[in-house]
Image: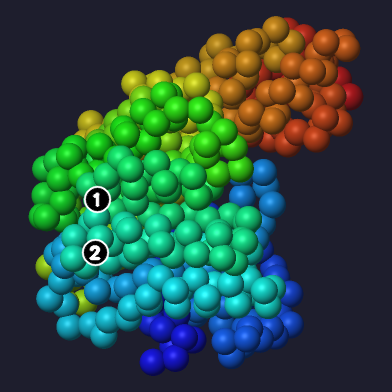
Amino acid sequence: MDVALKLESVASQMHLEPAEEKQVVVDDAPQIAPCGITVGKQAKRESLGIYNAAMPGGKTIPLLKTMLTTACERNCAYCPFRAGRNYRRTTFKPEEMAKTFHQMEQAGMVQGLFLSSGIIKGSIVTQDKLLETVEIIRKRYRFNGYIHLKVMPGAEKAQLERAMQLTDRLSVNLEGPTEQRLATLAPMKQLSAELIRPLQLIEEIRRTQPAYTGWKRRWPSTATQFVVGAVGDTDLELLQATDYLYHRLQLRRTYFSAFSPIRDTPLESVAATPPIREARLYQASFLLRDYAFDLEELPFSADGNLPHEVDPKMAWANVHLQDEPVELNHAERRQLLRVPGIGPWSADRIMEARRAGKLRDLRDLQQLGLKTKRMERFVLLDGHRPNHQLRFF
């Protein structure tokens, strides 16, 4: 099988691995790599596993998302690559994958790599092959750009240390928020021993070893993924786990993948999870990570799930700020972040502007570049609700 067909075979299921994707308009001029791959329109790029990826600094790059092998000895109930499924497998050798990525990078097709793998001959052997691939890319081909590497279940500390010296991001797919949920999703995986433990070791390395030994003299960020809605998991369970990961293990991102049934898997008859649930989980997770919300403040219903009809920040504000609006001229940053329509950037702009004088009406906020519609009901400006002030203009 030629390289392009291999990449297409792997890419057909890579949408199940959410990473740094961002939807943008791209140049559709065709590009040809030395390996013979031609890439033109975005649909063709995605068929090879090339996605637009948003980097931490806001830059967008074309990212190759792929796997060393789609063969796997694990039997995860939701996964298209599970052991025993009637599915044509694709495998790259480390040298082959590294060379293919290098040629695509040299041709201007990609600027970064997300690399995962099915598990063959155990997690340790598989992790070694992943590390070998990245070593070749970094050392032989002198690639200094972005690499996001998947950590296999039960990876050893020495492997994690080496991965932290070579990559910009590491991720461990937890899949389920509790041992009970994971046992149904992935019967051969152990949440604490195989999945949480590598993340704990990564955080231990960060705390005990000098950061200058990491890639580009800093440690990689860490991330995880949960499969949402396949086995009765609740939003409360998912966000309890997320809160622990953010605040105890310093993860930078939790990805949520709305379950979609796949033919010839044990969960093929389970209904797909509505995309709105995934969206609400992301919104709630950002409140925990970036907005100083506590888990107990999120608007869970009696069944442990978030409302779908309104975003969680607005739901909180409707209860707590409707009758007690926030005075923008005096509020602390933490209070500002609880107002719908005010994010970290907006809060900083407000705090900077009010040092120069009082904010008196919505036009003052709009001149700062803020959108004011969502916040109007929940704020005071110089002691007055904005809508009351506007009647005098």
Total numbered labels? 2
Which of the two residues, 10 or 355, is positioned nearer the viewer here? 10
Q: What residue type is labelled 2?
A: Ile
Q: Can the viewer see residue 198?
A: yes
Residue found at x 14% / y 41%:
179
The residue at which mark 1 appears reads as 153
* Along the viewing direction, whichever of 315 and 258 lies nearer the viewer: 258
Check the image and report above or below for 82 versus 359.
below
Please provide percent x and percent y for residue 6: 41, 84
Residue under the image location 25 percent in, 37 percent down: 197
Q: Is residue 238 above or below residue 12?
A: above
Image x and y of residue 28, in percent: 71, 80
- Residue type, numbered disc 1: Pro
Q: Based on the displayed image, in which of its 4 quarters is residue 88 positioned?
A: bottom left
Q: Residues within 10 Å of mark 1 (few under 14, many from 20)?
A: many
Relative side of 286 to 295, left or right: right
Which residue, given by chain and number where applicable, does mark 2 sit on? 119
Give residue 315's position: percent from left, percent from top: 45, 31
